Image (cartoon, rainbow, N blue to C red):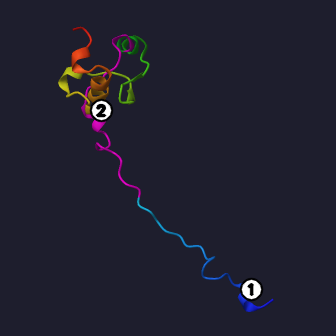
Amino acid sequence: MTEQETRPSEQTRASTTTIARPDTQVAEPGDSERFSHYVRKEKIVEAAVTGTPVIALCGKVWVPNRDPGRFPVCPACQDILDKAFPPDDAPGE
């Protein structure tokens, strides 16, 4: 066997490249704690009685234990609700 047969050619050598993953987070970590989230009312009542976690429209999972009126509405929850019920189709109107 010749030396050229035992060494890989320049074309077959592998290299490693690190690719930076773009930051896809819209909000800072922990921002969901600063908002009120939309959850079905009956699920909130159930969580208050049993202590089971609820899932907001935006996907946040937690056990409700604070007054949501003290915080602004979660932008992701609001966006999902607006898409589901456009202003002229708003529930209760």
In the rendered structure, the answer to whether residue 19 lies left or right of residue 27 reads right
The amino acid at mark 1 is: Glu
What residue is rendered at 46% in x and 65% in y?
18
Q: Say above or below: 41 vs 33.
A: above
| Count of numbered marks | 2
Q: Is residue 5 above or below residue 23?
A: below
Q: Residue at x 33, y 12 (%)?
A: 41
Name the residue beneath numbered marker 2. 76
Could you say which disc has been placed on residue 5 in the image?
A: 1
Q: Which residues are magenta?
A: 21-43
Residue 51 appears at what percent x and percent y? 41, 17
Where in the figure is residue 56, as x and y percent of width and height?
36, 25
- Residue type at mark 2? Ala
Report the front residue among 34 and 89: 89
Of label 1 and label 2, which has the lower sequence position?
A: 1
Q: Main secondary structure of the magenta part?
A: loop
Q: Return the residue found at the far bottom.
A: 2
Q: Residue 67, can we see it?
A: no
At numbered mark 1, what does the secondary structure look like: helix, strand or loop? helix
Q: Relative to 27, does residue 56 appear above or below in the rendering?
A: above
Query: In what quadrant of the picture does the N terminus appear?
Result: bottom right
- Residue shown at the point (42%, 22%) measured from the top left: 53
- Circle 2: element type: helix
Residue 13 falls in which quadrant of the image? Answer: bottom right
Q: Which mark is residue 48?
A: none
